Amino acid sequence: MSQTPVFPEGFLWGAATAAHQIEGSPLADGAGPSIWTRFAHTPGMMLNGDTGDVACDHYNRWREDVKLMRELGLTAYRFSVSWSRILPEGTGRVNPKGVDFYSRLVDALLENGIEPLLTLYHWDLPAALDDRGGWLNRDIADWFAEYAGVMYRALDGRVKKWVTLNEPWVVTDGGYLHGALAPGHRSRFEAPIASHNLMRAHGAAVKAYRELGKHEIGLVVNIEPKYPASDSAEDQAATRRAHAYMNEQYLHPALLGHYPPELKEIFGEAWPDWPAEDFELIKQKLDFVGINYYTRNVTRAAESYPLNAAMVKQPLGTYTETGWEVFPQGLADLLLWFKRTYGDLPVYITENGAAFFDPPTADVDPRTGARRVRDPLRIDYLRKHIGAVYDAIQAGVDVRGYMLWSLLDNLEWSLGYSKRFGMIHVNYATQERTPKDSARWYAEVIRTHGRKL
Ligand code: LGS
């Protein structure tokens, strides 16, 4: 990035969260349990035994949180709906109090000039549906479309940007292949089935949207560029597998109507021959794609399950507290790859951000008396990544917005509260919120529409 950036008019500046990570009160007002509530209460699954029972207490403090968003000048907010608040058993009976919670939230956002981006599925499947096979049951495409339809009827018009699934790759890789995330399965045979049903559910929800909704709908994927560690044939092949597995496994069927051939190579006999008509359901016209970007991956051949590839740590690299390399150029590379491969579809950066070790308590600025959390590494990370987004826009990629992960420090899934991604610090003992220096910096970026990066 060389000159003063001028972001496109209407470019959205936002922040992202997910229901289970911030709301707390998972069973309030008639909600049913989700697989994450169940998983978190299974001994040994969560770091430090943390659970989402309270989280950021956003379920009770959402008004305060919307006020904070307004103070920072956000023009968009990406959040997710918890399916089991809406349909406690996953299908059938609708719980009006669950719908009301999100309806009030959306009204408050609109009153404050903040555009809602609503994610229908950010990993918290109703436990009742897991009992019926969850993502392994083909019927889940209908279950998901039913739930989506309830939300479209309740909120379409007020919500104009809908997301079907957040990161199907993580749902499958973490939930069905490696087992570190709910529902905690570890099966090479289940993973392809879960993936395929996620995509069928995505297709069914988009189809239902075309009947019931009038605005925009898309899919959010987590993708990262894979660079070969050397030019050896083995490393090149390993990189190709890793790329197909993470970057093409979901975008290819959704946008091109077929899987990349490498998946058969990776899963072998566990990769079924799918019915051709499934791809008609999966490949629906999308209005945008959301990209979550955190890091890159330098890849070498290695014995590993199931990819036979490994990440090569960069001796000169900078790493975040979660051990992910800071590599802003990767975001620009990725966006250009996306355009080359899938064409000129509008893109939102639906997540980008980092966990760093922030000072544990907010200190007081002696000059102003205001509480402060100094997080210069996060500011540096954000500045460089927003700069990379700008570079991609200059190179012709149609990027329409940037959502910072995350608005608040929150429950980082099985890592519990140990990792803080927020631009707003949360004191979990008192629930006090303190905007970090990065939040003040981001507010200035928004105020100047990115001119002051
Ligand atoms: O909190 C999650 C964030 C944090 O980092 C959010 O709910 C998810 O949607 C998303 O997966 N999130 C996330 N992803 C970073 C994945 C980077 C993986 C790099 C692995 C390298 C060893």
Image (tube, rainbow, N blue to C red):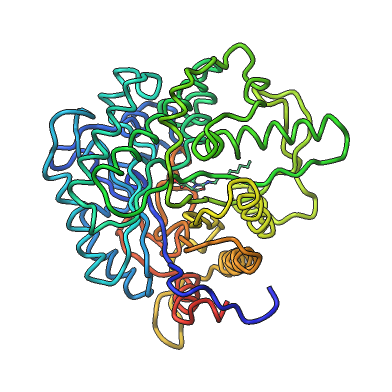
Q: Quadrant of the C terminus?
A: bottom right
Quarter assignment of residue 126: top left
Q: Residue furthest right?
A: 232
Q: Is residue 381 left or right of residue 219?
A: right
Q: Is residue 409 left or right of residue 325?
A: left
Image coordinates of residue 82 in percent, x first then y, are 28, 41
The number of numbered badges drawn on the structure is 0
What's the residue at 57%, 14% (across, down)? 270
Residue nearest the viewer, comparing 34 with 376: 34
Q: Residue furthest top?
A: 269
Q: Residue furthest bottom?
A: 367
What's the residue at 53%, 30% (across, down)? 173
Quarter assignment of residue 245: top right
Image coordinates of residue 231 in percent, x first then y, are 87, 39
Q: Is residue 191 left or right of residue 17?
A: right
Residue nearest the viewer, comparing 185 with 208: 208
Image coordinates of residue 35 in percent, x first then y, are 33, 30
Looking at the image, residue 307 lies above or below residue 292: above
Residue nearest the viewer, comparing 394 with 279: 279
What's the residue at 32%, 29% (across, down)? 38
Image coordinates of residue 281 in percent, x first then y, are 40, 30
What's the residue at 53%, 58% (across, down)? 353
Q: Quadrant of the N terminus?
A: bottom right
